[in-house]
Amino acid sequence: MQATTMWQKTTGSGITVALIDSGVQADLPDLVGQVLPGKNFSALPGGADTDVDKDGHGSQMASLIAGTAKNGGGQGAQGLAPGVKILPLRVVGQGDNEAAFTASYSSQLAAAINYAADSNAQVINLSQGQPVDAPAVKAAVAYAESKGKLVVAAVGNDGATGNPVNYPAAYPGVLGVASINEQAQVTQDSEYGPQVAITAPGSNMYDACPGPTGYCESSGTSDATAIVSASAALVWSLHPTWTANQVMRVLINTADGNGKWDPHFGWGVVRPRVALTNPGDPGPADVNPLIPASASTPPSAKPSAPASAKPSSSPVSSSGSSSGGSNTGLYIGIGVAVVVLGGGGAAFALMRRGKKDDRNGPPPPPPGAGPGAGPVGYGGYQPQAQAQPQGPVGYPPQGAPDAQAPNAPYGNLPNPYGNNPRQ
């Protein structure tokens, strides 16, 4: 994605991303100084600056967005927008049955979105969701949009197993994100349909996380969502007077779909470098490009229902589109180099080549072979392999029986982050 070229223009400074997730381990070397005081909406002890997910989902997303590569003298994980600050808002659904879990999760999620709407954050990252249209969550999303926030959400990882419609990604005006692999193909599990607005790299991502080595490998629409949030932060940092609608429109118009929508790719693969160098016309400040004009309501009002389908042409006229062709060659040629390894000229090696000494764990399973999300939450990612030395300490290899502590706080229920290997 030529991040070093983009960083000559901006690193995302001045932008805050509200990360609604499992918490963020703020003392990870690559995240020190990047995490603002947040809020814990769960009943679990500790603050939002502690990640309660065993695979560190929230920390991984924060790393993809704003990692600084400080660890090891500049050899750690660097996010796409290292100048961004992260506002962690912890949400962890709990309950003795699926109904109780859904109620708990929806209540926390709505409260966290409302909190983010009233905060100074410009972007709300939702690498999570559920196939439940909860009225409180829908109202919270509408409120956030009315407050000028750009809401970015994962469309889910059940594309190969039923492809359910997931929320908040399917709510009106939300930038729903699907994922691609290194060959610029939509990943097998990435969901598809009218909720998909844009696509981003989300396969075989390496990022900072709690654990023996401090690094993990992950894949899914969660990761892709973090990349889109970081892309939005870069654009907004360079154009601070733009609104969320304008930033979204520029991301859509500079994606590689050439103004055509596809149920798998949306408007195409996000290209922040093009958005920074040739953004085109950002369009009207008060019109969300994902809400059809016939369904438009005053900015402070809640849209009545999700649109049944995306438009068949670009939300902005061709004068707002960008030249530059497709990204396909870029992804095939250099791989999905979005979490780059610090250290000068070596920064844009393929991520598979990074940190060789630390990543001698088992290879990731083939698509669809790993544990999936459950019926309640999709999770924006499915963990592949803990990046750690082999041995008796730490997490078991992918697919091995789980020998860790009991499955608190999730019990036997699926969770919205999609990393429940015990289901």
Image (cartoon, rainbow, N blue to C red):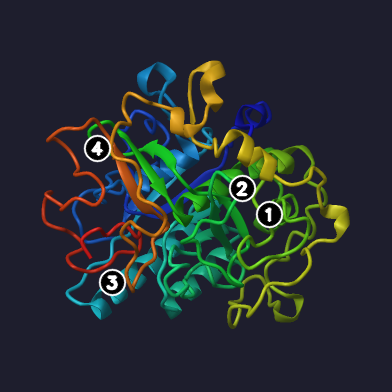
Where 214 falls versus 164 (above or below)? above
Assess disc 2: are there few (<14), some (14-19) or many (≥20) residues with their C-alpha within 10 Å of its C-alpha. Answer: many
Mark nearer the viewer, 4 or 1: 4
| Residue denoted by label 1 | 243
User: Which residue occupies the foreground of this view, 69 or 365?
Assistant: 365
Q: Secondary structure at mark 1?
A: loop
Assess disc 4: are there few (<14), some (14-19) or many (≥20) residues with their C-alpha within 10 Å of its C-alpha. Answer: some
Indicate the position of residue 268 as horizontal and vertical percent values.
67, 56
Mark nearer the viewer, 1 or 2: 2
Mark nearer the viewer, 1 or 3: 3
| Residue denoted by label 4 | 211
Indicate the position of residue 294 as horizontal and vertical percent values.
75, 81
- Report the residue at 11% width, 49% height from top: 403
Can you tell which quarter of the image residue 277 is in? top right
Assess disc 1: are there few (<14), some (14-19) or many (≥20) residues with their C-alpha within 10 Å of its C-alpha. Answer: many
Circles 4 and 1, Cβ within 8 Å, touching? The answer is no
Q: Please count the marks in the image.
A: 4
Can you tell which quarter of the image residue 257 is in? bottom right
User: Separation of disc 4 and disc 1 at Cα?
Assistant: 38 Å
Residue type, numbered disc 3: Ser
Residue type, numbered disc 2: Ala
Q: Secondary structure at mark 2?
A: helix
- Report the residue at 59% width, 78% height from top: 306
User: Separation of disc 3 and disc 4 at Cα?
Assistant: 28 Å
Residue type, numbered disc 4: Gly
| Residue denoted by label 3 | 104
Where 97 falls versus 411 (above or below)? below
> Is residue 68 visible to the viewer in this orientation of the structure?
no
| Residue denoted by label 2 | 232
